[in-house]
Structure formats: structure tokens, C-alpha cells
Amino acid sequence: MTRIWDEGLQSERTRLAWVRTAALLAVGSLGAGGVALRAGVPPAAAIPFVLAAACGALLLARTGIRYQRVQRALHECSPLDNRADALIAWFATLAVAAGAAVFMLIR
């Protein structure tokens, strides 16, 4: 059996990348929503930014669980299914894009 575990810090760097992504989604979306509201956009138009911020917060909360699953999969040489996290990040990105489009069309 081939060992895929490496003693380097690849898992830790990946975890930090997910933390950066989640924090940027959460904080950046809240900031963009605040800018949209201060610019006079109707509050309903800021909903995509709120959804993106919630997705970012969810990803941030799942960081520890994801890291443990990655470690277990690496040590046991088993496959890892991270589709849920990728879908959450994808949805958040689409929500930010939709919020930006609505902001530009209304302004």
C-alpha cells in the first residue's frame, strides 16, 4: 500500500486557505452589504450579501471539522469528499456576484 501521508504542513496550509476564504466571504460580504445600504439601495437588494456572509460564517465554523476529516483521510489512505464545502463556497461567490449586479443595476 502506498503511503500518501507527508510530514509537511500541507494540511495546515490548506486549512489556513479555507480560513482566509471564509473570513473574506463573511466580512467582505457584510461590508459590501453595508456599502450598498448606505448608498441608498433598498434593503431587499442587500439580501445576496447577507446570504454570502452567512455562507462564509458557515465555512469558518466548519474549518475544524474539515481539517480533522482531511487528517483522518490522509492517515487512513481513504478518499475524502469535500463537495459540501465547495458548494457552499460556490454559492457564496454567486451570491456576491448577484449582489454586485443588483447594486450596479439599481445605482
Image: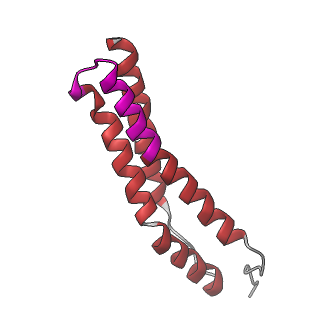
What percent of the width, then of the height, locates residue 38? 32, 24
User: Which portion, as a residue range, is magenta?
Assistant: 27-44
Look at the image and name its color scheme.
secondary structure
What residue is rendered at 42% in x and 51% in y? Answer: 56
The N terminus lies in which quarter of the figure?
bottom right
In the displayed structure, 63 sits above or below 25; it is below
Residue 29 falls within the magenta-colored stretch: yes
Please give left or right for residue 79 compared with residue 32 in the image: right
Please give left or right for residue 48 compared with residue 44 in the image: right
**Which one is in front, 38 or 27?**
38
What residue is rendered at 28% in x and 19% in y? Answer: 41
In the displayed structure, 76 sits above or below 101; it is below
What residue is rendered at 62% in x and 57% in y? Answer: 17
Which quadrant holds residue 97? Answer: top left
What percent of the width, then of the height, locates residue 61? 41, 65
Which quadrant holds residue 106? Answer: top left
Give the main secondary structure, helix, strand or loop, of the magenta stretch: helix
What residue is rendered at 49% in x and 73% in y? Answer: 64
Residue 26 falls within the magenta-colored stretch: no
What percent of the width, then of the height, locates residue 66? 50, 70
**Which one is in front, 51 or 35?**
35
